[in-house]
Amino acid sequence: MAENTGRGPSPVFFADMRAGHGKSLLDKVEALFEKAGLQQAIEPGDLVAVKLHFGEAGNTGYIRPQFLRRVVNLVKKAGGLPFLTDANTLYFGTRSNAVDHLQTAILNGFDFAVVDAPVIIADGLTGKDFISVEVNRKNFKEVKIASAVYHADALIAVTHFKGHEMTGFGGVLKNLGMGCGSRSGKQMMHSDVLPSVNPAKCRGCDKCSRWCPAGAIGVRDKVSVVDTGKCIGCGECTVTCPYHAIGINWKTEPDIIQEKIVEYAQGVLDNKKGKYGFITFATNISPDCDCYGWSDAPLVRDIGIFASRDPVAIDQACIDLINREKPLPNNRLEGRGNVQDKFRALYPEIDWSRQLSYAEEIGLGTRKYELIKI
């Protein structure tokens, strides 16, 4: 199975959630890996980065480690030397340095005894291990890619598809671009975003200031105030506020952060021609990123698992199938009827399609796909 050269739709392989005697979901992951030809991205002796999200402490939306063990076994079967990896976060959570990050990964089940592979934090102890990669795009001339990802011979990205308050949704492109950027790279991607406090909703609880990595928020007269000179635009306060009092004030258009993420995704893939593949879980489809210390109720039922060699096609296929579903009761879409665009309903100021169209423009893949059910 070769990569798509741009002629016609890319194949995206899909398995639904049905399982039974003699055929588990773990078996379906193996079948998807092999049908999509991901083993062809791996040569004997390759160091293979298995890029995933280990989940923040308190979050339960991340992919179960048992699935990662099956991916690890398949990489080994192809002769590769796999390691599980992610880069440190910009915000102050439980993954902003390698010590906390490793402890969180282990607490969430990504221990060697479970996944049969080591865990390596891709940008080092404090996020300063990165390689500057030339991309020559409209927003960045070069990007800062976590060194363990850059130096790996091959890459398999295992992604949990979900909503996101800055990009509409988070799929493969975000897992690659934001996920593999160094901490300083993440700051550069977020630099066009500033928070805006609604004083009518703010109750001065001070939770936002305790989570702000830049010390840019304080409470004055029982209302949070943002120091825009200090703000780094990470958006942590937006999702921390329990009263939804802090929205996003875009310095430019929200399309820009999506373009920046895509340019970082290019930096991840550029030195791995033909040596990458993607598996995406459209399960537990939460409205927020897995970076937060909670998981809100899923928007729709579990759809299934996808695999492809094309990062654009697999993201497009996931969002298309999700948008065909009826919303589940008791989630953030409740009361809005059968909304066709789930993520635009959640984040009306964000046109999530920009990440897909821009990735297609710069040659990362195609939005055209052929869905092949196994």
Image (spheres, rainbow, N blue to C red):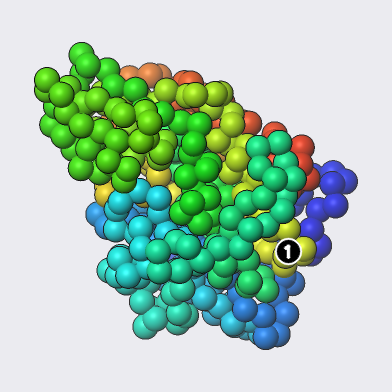
Q: Name the residue under label 1.
A: 271
Q: In this view, does 115 lie above or below 357?
A: below
Position of residue 220 measured from the top left corner of the image (x, y, whole percent):
15, 24
The image quadrant where one finds the N terminus is: bottom right
Question: Toward which corner of the image does residue 229 lie, by quadrant?
Answer: top left
Position of residue 69 measured from the top left corner of the image (x, y, whole percent):
47, 75
Q: Is residue 268 left or right of residue 194?
A: right
Mark 1 secondary-structure assignment: loop
Residue 254 in view here: yes
Query: Mark 1: few, some, or many residues within 10 Å (few <14, many ≥20)?
Result: some
Position of residue 117 measured from the top left corner of the image (x, y, whole percent):
47, 80
The image quadrant where one finds the C terminus is: bottom right
What residue occupies the far right of the structure in this picture?
A: 7
What type is the residue that disc 1 sits on?
Answer: Asn
Q: Which of 69 and 146 is in front in this view?
A: 146
Q: Is residue 242 left or right of residue 10?
A: left
Residue 13 in view here: no
Question: What residue do we see at 32% from left, 32% from top?
Answer: 238
What residue occupies the far front of the structure in this picture?
A: 229
Q: Is residue 162 left or right of residue 14?
A: left
Position of residue 42 measured from the top left corner of the image (x, y, whole percent):
70, 75
Q: Is residue 313 left or right of residue 2?
A: left
